[in-house]
Image (cartoon, rainbow, N blue to C red):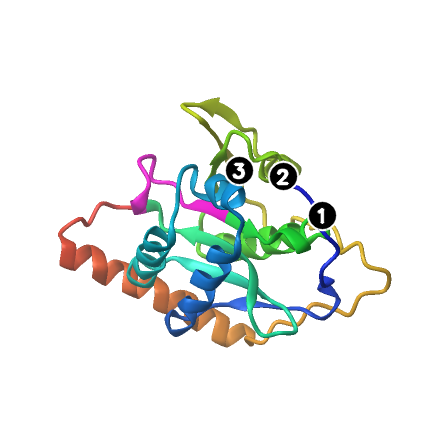
């Protein structure tokens, strides 16, 4: 992922959780990624049909999504926390995507910090992050937060220890306005609880009630 163009700045952004009814905004964001960035995000080819199926799956499996909203009201970056039962090592998985005009401006770091805070609140002590082997920006971001990635079968994967007081670098814009979180703390907690409940119900219905 490279820093392409100047685009808009993150000075007047909003970062908050998405609810299921807003998942089309995630789909639109993922479709705006250039083909190389989308390949890095999913470690392989991802056309519109794949992205549509992926976002629909997120609606049913309890995935928690922290989204970056720009002034136009669209989502231009996202951080995802996937439940541990979806992974082979029973660790929650972190995933990130940032559109080209917002790279190298601290957006990924802000999302990383907020997602770690959510994962820590849920009681997770470790999380896995996986990215394509060519995704240098994501690898650098993961290393910044303490993940030690190793290369395996065309992808880089590593485990990060979750600490509640991780500080994220600030945006590079001079005197930016503070990030606004439109979801009050109680509402954010309720959203997390709701996602967890949906995930448990999904497991029960599917018969795959493997412990986290």
Q: Is residue 23 above or below residue 210?
A: below
Q: Which mark is residue 137?
A: 2
Q: Is 90 part of what is drawn in magenta?
A: yes
Mark drawn on residue 104: 1
* In the foreground, 119 or 13: 13
Question: Residue 166's spot in the image, x, y percent?
Answer: 65, 48
Residue 160 in view (yes/no): yes
Marks 1 and 2, how far apart at CA:
9 Å
Q: Is residue 10 above or below residue 156?
A: below
Per the image, label 2 sits on a secondary structure element best described as: helix
Q: Is residue 117 above or below residue 142?
A: below
Is residue 109 left or right of 153 when viewed as pictured? right
Q: Are marks 1 and 2 in contact (CB under 8 Å)?
A: yes
Question: Helix or strand or loop: what does disc 3 sit on?
Answer: strand
Mark nearest the camera among 3 and 2 is 2
Q: Nearer the viewer, mark 1 or mark 3?
A: 1
Residue drawn at x 56%, y 76% is 184
Q: Which residue is mark 3?
A: 160
Mark 3 and mark 2 lie on one chain; the one further toward the N terminus is 2
Q: Earlier in the sequence, mark 1 or mark 2?
A: 1
Q: Residues within 10 Å of mark 1 (few under 14, many from 20)?
A: some
Callout 3 touching callout 2 (CB < 8 Å): no
The magenta span reads 85-95
| Distance from Cα at disc 3 to Cα at disc 2 | 17 Å
């Amino acid at each position: 992922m490279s820093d392409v163009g100047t685009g808009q700045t993150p000075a007047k952004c909003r970062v908050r959780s998405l609810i299921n009814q807003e998942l089309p905004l995630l789909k639109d964001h993922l479709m705006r990624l250039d083909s190389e960035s989308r390949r890095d995000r999913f470690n392989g080819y991802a056309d519109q049909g794949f992205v549509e199926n992926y976002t629909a799956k997120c609606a049913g499996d309890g995935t928690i999504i922290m989204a970056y909203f720009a002034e136009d009201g669209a989502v231009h970056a996202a951080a995802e926390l996937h439940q541990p039962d979806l992974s082979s090592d029973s660790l929650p998985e972190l995933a990130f995507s940032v559109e080209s005009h917002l790279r190298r401006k601290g957006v990924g770091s802000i999302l990383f910090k907020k997602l770690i805070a959510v994962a820590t609140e849920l009681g997770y002590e470790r999380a896995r992050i996986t990215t394509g082997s060519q995704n240098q920006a994501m690898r650098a971001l993961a290393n910044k937060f303490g993940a030690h990635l190793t290369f395996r079968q065309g992808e880089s994967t590593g485990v990060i220890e979750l600490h509640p007081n991780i500080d994220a670098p600030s945006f590079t814009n001079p005197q930016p306005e503070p990030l606004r979180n439109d979801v009050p703390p109680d509402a954010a907690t309720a959203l997390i609880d709701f996602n967890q409940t949906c995930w448990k119900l999904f497991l029960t219905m599917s018969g795959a009630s493997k412990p986290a």
